[in-house]
Amino acid sequence: MPGVVIVGAQWGDEGKGKVVDIYTEHADMVVRFAGGPNAGHTLVVGADKLVVRLVPSGILRPQSTCVLGQGMVVDPATLAAELAELSRRGLLEGRELWLSDRAHLILPYHVAIDTLRERGAGAIGTTKRGVGPAYEDKAARLGIHAGALRDPARLEAAITRALARWAPVARDLGGELPSLADVMAAVAPVREALAARLTDAASLVDGALRAGKKVLFEGAQGTLLDVDHGTYPFVTSSSAIAGGACTGAGVGPTRIGCVVGLTKAYTTRVGGGPFPTELHDDVGEAIRKAGSEFGSVTGRPRRTGWLDLPALRYATVVNGFDGLALTKLDVLTGQPEVRACVAYEVDGRETRDFPLADLDRARPIYRTFPGWSEDLRGARRLEDLPARARAFVDFVSAESGCPLFVVSVGYERDDTIVLRSPFG
Ligand code: GDP
Ligand code: IMO
Ligand code: MG
């Protein structure tokens, strides 16, 4: 059974948590392959709400093994706190949850550097969780593998080297780093518990795929935040696109059978950077309110705007989407009209492509749809949608060239139109 990859098509927060939870009902394994505690994936079942940052969103499904892959950067204290919360809710006992011994550690000095940089002129609106500096260490070949949690002496030596490297950077930024003792003290109480969960994750995933198990690879962030394909430099530091599942989990491209892209029925972005379809008016505010668009990690208000179809087509190309999950359609209910950007004008020329290099000069060209006022939450089939909402959904599918796999009409697990399983 080939693996399935689910990734965001926009700037994150597309509803990956909800859709992964739905698809994991039939999955044996769910694997995070990129990012770290900058992610916040929300799971809602009845009155219970859970936001996971490092643990895969398959955690609510007892039969599914959860894996944190080597493409991730993992803050030990954050992971331990997340596991403690899961345990408190009775969601961890009897579950298999593994951490790659080749994932990289985020330690307090990474968080300190990230925070100091965000105070300065070069701020890009990061989540200040140390993600960027940890990936910098990895690329500089100075990072610390999670496997070092097995060996305190090795860990201490590696942290000493890292502190020496970061000290001048912190000084230039007018700040200080935590001491070696502080860093060791942050890790000590959680070290053994996390060490017990370390494994060779790539082999584990390979074994599951070879055994014909259903393996789902859960993206974090989104295509436009990808370090290679996003709106650089306003991006995260990892490979958020579908290809990142191969490098970040250690599986060959031939093992991936299906890629599902997630998009909201509109667009949001947290942090700085270009956002051509952004709304600065009452409609933007109404969408923020109706969609509860506040960051699940930082609580920051998310910027809101209309759906960007050139961007969605771009995401379709770089990820090779087989199908789309369209989320938060219900949030547009009550808008007198709904818009979608269908093309751009750049220097007097019209293009249907996403003008990644010219976003500062690109002017969106919109198509306007009549709005709808019906509550969509009870819809379970496309036929249940009011005609105007259905017309919008069909347009998105046609313009992106992707069939719809899911249409989500509420934050609850049940408020979902499931059209196709990516497992075939
Ligand atoms: P993720 O990072 O992609 O997992 O998304 P987040 O969890 O950060 O943000 C998505 C938010 O939208 C969460 O609060 C979800 O509970 C919520 N959500 C997901 N799908 C829907 C939907 O179809 N309708 C509504 N109203 N909310 C949704
Ligand atoms: P999920 O997985 C939305 C954004 C930050 C910032 C930029 C760089 O929940 O969709 P970083 O801390 O990664 O160095 O910040 O990336 N960002 C996200 N925005 N959802 C996310 O994750 C994000 N992860 C990072 O706001 O603009
Ligand atoms: Mg999120």
Image (cartoon, rainbow, N blue to C red):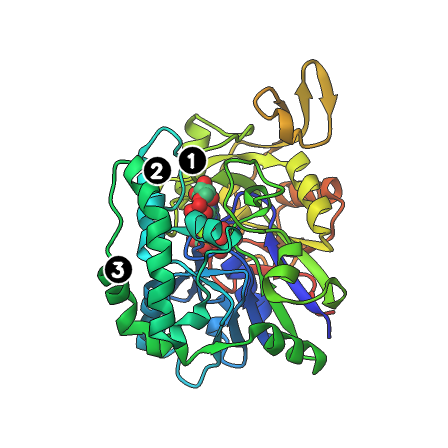
**Residue 263 placed where, x, y %?**
59, 47
First reached walking from the N terminus: tag 1 or tag 2: 2
Indicate which disc residue 118 carries: 2
Badge 2 marks a residue whose secondary structure is helix
**Residue 375 placed where, x, y %?**
50, 49
At x 73%, y 62%, the residue is: 253
- Find out if the beta carbon at label 2 lies less than 8 Å from the nearest ligand 2 atom: no
What's the distance in space between the residues labelled 1 and 3, CA to CA?
28 Å
**Residue 35 placed where, x, y %?**
49, 55
Q: Residues within 10 Å of mark 3 (few under 14, many from 20)?
A: some
What's the distance in space between the residues labelled 1 and 2, CA to CA?
7 Å
- Find out if the beta carbon at label 1 lies less than 8 Å from the nearest ligand 2 atom: yes
At x 35%, y 38%, the residue is: 117
Q: Is residue 52 above or below residue 299?
A: below
Q: Nearer the viewer, residue 376 or 230?
A: 230
Q: On the image, numbered disc 3 is attached to which residue?
A: 180
Quick check: can you spot residue 333? no
Q: Residues within 10 Å of mark 2 (few under 14, many from 20)?
A: some
- Find out if the beta carbon at label 3 lies less than 8 Å from the nearest ligand 2 atom: no
First reached walking from the N terminus: tag 2 or tag 3: 2
Q: On the image, numbered disc 1 is attached to which residue?
A: 124
Which amino acid, mark 2?
Glu
